Amino acid sequence: MKSGEKSLGRYALEESHKSFQQAYDLLSGKSEPTKEYRRVLLDLLNAWAPVFHWRASYKNLVDLLRANEEHAVSLGDKAGLGMFYSWMGLWLQCLEKAKDAQRYLSKSLEIGEEIENDKVIGYACTWMSMTCSDLGLLDDAVNHGKRAHELSKRIRFDPFLFLFSLRAMGFAYGFMGDCRKIDSIGRSMLEYGERRSDPRASAMGHNLIGAGHYWAGNFLLAIETLKKGILISPDPLLSCTAKTVLGGSNFLLGNMEEAEKYFVEVHRFCEEHGAGGMGAFSRSALSVIFLVKGELGRGVRMGVELMEWYEEKGNKFRLAHYLCRTGNIYLKMAQRKGSADLSFLVRNFGFIMKNFLVAGRKAEEYLKESVEVARQIGAMGIRGQASLGLGLLYKSRGKMDEAKKYFSEAIEAFEKSGAEGYLKQAREALATC
């Protein structure tokens, strides 16, 4: 176990994973393990868990934890059980089972508070912050992240908790669309990494700063920053996160080949390693790939399935985000933007004939629903982007009063969130009404 921890500290993830696996095989091979063996096994699982997370490899770990849950409960080691439940909550959240994750994390937090254990509370709050972001409980996500980060300052020699509590807050502010807060957290992590010569912290900082540029609509800056993070990132979790946002930035710039390259890479990684934390984004990316390849019917059908899945899972942020993106695709179709060659038209003839005349109505429907969901959860960034799309739609119809209304709402949201790129677009659009 010590060998695995040392390898993790040296950024040798595969070596660390191999050492933990060997120790686990030795301990779990006992036909009638003593209580002491089971206690050591629980400690091993809690120490091994960060390796799975850095590797963004989740498929096998939930089964591993579930196979040992009964032993963990029977030991009477509340601190160990609290950490075990926190890891179980994280893995369920990463596998997009947010409501199940919430239940485990609530148990972990309850145990931590009962025994007044800062570490258990800190980890439970960190992963609860991520889970609340998925569920659209963004104020709760920020509060849990703040609590975790304050506790991390009181715990010596736990940079993992320090960094991931910051990252959880960064995600919450990203879902809100608060570009200034994301940038501030990212720069704090970057400074921490440079001061301590920690490439993980530096890569996380670049990722958050890049995400802040992405949510602000400054896609060229996002690409430049995220590429820096990939160059220094030693771990799949961080590089895969960066590539997801790189794909989105290139897509919104119209660089379809680059977007497809990143999206395919992320999707393949998720399929091979069970990187469920990026699973929803990889599926969203795949639907976009079909669209950019000209397989319109397949891409939109997949999008509809995704939206239904988000509604079922209660993932309100991703629902609002996908509604916004799909609405803007229909908006471009309604505005007849973009060129198409003969093969594209022939391949999509049935879809185009069926949807062209109703593209404007579908754009309006999706964008309005995006605005409403985003307003409910406090996602001002998505609300601003969807409002901007509605303004452009009504402007193209000659409905200037409606266009001005939505442009003004978009400007208000972008001013509050610090989304400078989108703010410039909205102001220019309002000026031409």
Image (cartoon, rainbow, N blue to C red):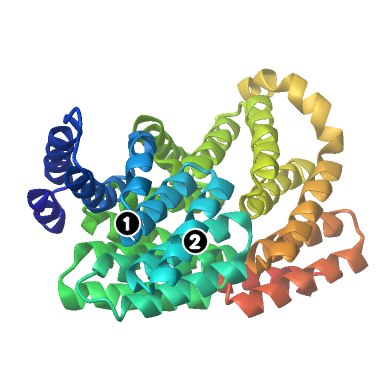
User: What amino acid is at disc 1?
Assistant: Lys
Q: As drawn, is 35 to the left or to the right of 176?
A: left
- Residue 94 in percent (x, y) is at 45, 46
- What residue lies at 41% left-to-right and 48% top-to-bottom? 88
Q: Note whether 301 is above or below 84 in the view shown.
A: above
- Residue 254 in percent (x, y) is at 54, 47
| Front-lying residue, 393 or 55 | 55
| Residue 353: quadrant of the picture | top right
Callout 1 secondary element:
helix
| Front-lying residue, 247 or 165 | 165
| Residue 137: quadrant of the picture | bottom right
| Front-lying residue, 425 or 49 | 49
Q: Quadrant of the C terminus?
A: bottom right
- Residue 418 in percent (x, y) is at 57, 77
- What residue lies at 59% left-to-right and 49% top-to-bottom? 99
Residue that numbered label 1 is attached to: 227
Tell me the tag on residue 128: 2
Q: As drawn, is 334 to the left or to the right of 164?
A: right
- What residue lies at 22% left-to-right and 76% top-to-bottom? 156
- Give the foreground label among 1 and 2: 2
Q: Is residue 209 visible?
A: no
User: What amino acid is at disc 2?
Assistant: Met
Q: Note whether 432 is above or below 238 in the view shown.
A: below
| Residue 151: quadrant of the picture | bottom left
Q: As drawn, is 239 to the left or to the right of 93?
A: left
